[in-house]
Image (cartoon, grey):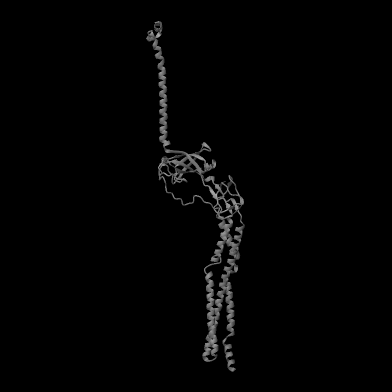
Amino acid sequence: MNAQNDTQKVSNSSPAAAPVSPAATAPASTATAPARNRRLLWLSILSGAFLLIGAGYGAYWATVLRYRQTTDDAYVNGNVVQITPQISGTVVAIGADDTQFVKSGQPLVRLDQADAKVALDQAEAQLARTVREVRNLFATSAQLRAAVQLRQSDLDMARKDLERRERLGNSGAISAEELTHARDAYASAQAGLLAAQQQLAGNQARVDGTTVEDHPDVRNAAAAVRSAYLEYSRTVLPAPVSGFVARRNVQLGQRVNPGAPLMSVVPLDQVWVDANFKEPQLAKMRVGQPVELTADLYGRSTVYHGKVEGFGAGTGSAFALLPAQNATGNWIKIVQRVPVRIALDPREMAAHPLQIGLSMKAEVSVRQDNGARLPELAHTAPAYSTDVFQSPDAMADSRVRAIIAENESAALAKPSDKVATTKSRVGDAAGARSGEATDPDLLAQVRRQRGH
């Protein structure tokens, strides 16, 4: 009973039981209206801002971003020129070490030259000997021509003697034995002329249509000199291009074989970027499209400008050392990437050089997507070339010409003088012989024989 009475007292004394007048509630509703309006205003402002941002981003995407393909899976790549010997030898000098810059043609490795020098001296001596032997062939041809003319003169004299003796034999002025001797002398002169002509033909076959320098024996010996000279020049390994030395693994005294990698030269002025784009990004990508690149080395403040130079013939996984086996049962589809080569501006490369393997971010503008995606453009000119290996050939040819000139006789240039001298000697001999067998002398001899 006491608890119920206490409850009634509390409820009777509660203010909620008192009636609320309209005048008391009017100020409260008036105070909440401005706050609600402010919230609506801010919501409207924020909604409008978001709408403007969305519209701006949509316009920016429609005009710019939809024509740009970006990837950060891009790295600097370039040529790594290996220095390999062409002959076997022992390393006696090393001209450059890692991180050092070398110029094209600068000696990098030197091999022992003793064996190559001996072989070169032997080849040069053989060439000089061959030139002199060929000179002897030409001189022998001139001698044999003179011998043929001499035999021809002997034959003419034998024929004339035979004709005279036959006339005298018909008249009984000479004996039959003497006529037989004249006929034998004529036949012997014919055989001598034929033998001389055959000797001349055999020797002429070895020199006909050639000179000392163009003779096959001389050319063969000259080729041996060139080969020995090239062998000698290859004891020095020059730098094919200008660049920085990397991966040197050759040591002094090391015995190297042809093709063994000794060191590498990296021309950092010939680098490019290989950007690996996903398959959907390649649909509108074409050769020649402009590219903007940034390097992690320099940050976003340095922007490189390049262009798409070409596309890889396959995805990276297709040319991997262990290609994916997609025919297996546990197969998961993975978006493939294709390497895209990007050429850089040489002037920007000179101002901010890059090294092979650095990370890049590439952004390609695909707005101009005309033309074939994989154009078949054949290049006739070599992409890379060097002339540091051409000088030994020219020097070897110069040495060969010098050896031939030193051993070629100056008298060989005037073979007509020798022939003319030989002809005069033949004429004198023929005249002497004919003077000894003139007709008056023959008649006097016949008369003396008759007198006996």
Instruction: Note whether residue 276 is visible.
Output: yes
- Give the image location of residue 323, x and y in percent: 45, 45
Question: Looking at the image, which residue is at 59% across and 77% down?
Answer: 425
Instruction: Note whether residue 397 is visible.
Output: no
Residue furthest to the bottom: 451
Q: Quadrant of the C terminus?
A: bottom right
- Give the image location of residue 232, x and y in percent: 59, 57
- Give the image location of residue 322, x and y in percent: 46, 45
- Total number of numbered labels? 0
Q: Quadrant of the N terminus?
A: top left
Question: Looking at the image, which residue is at 41% across and 17% down?
Answer: 34
Q: Nearer the viewer, residue 148 or 444?
A: 148
Q: Nearer the viewer, residue 327 or 369?
A: 327
Left or right: 236, with 322 as reference point: right
Q: Is residue 204 above or below residue 315?
A: below
Left or right: 56, with 84 as reference point: left
Q: Quadrant of residue 64?
A: top left
Q: Nearer the viewer, residue 193 or 232?
A: 232
Q: Is residue 94 above or below residue 10?
A: below
Residue furthest to the front: 1
Q: Is residue 417 above or below residue 400?
A: below
Q: Is residue 41 above or below residue 172?
A: above
- Give the image location of residue 143, x and y in percent: 57, 74
Q: Quadrant of residue 63?
A: top left
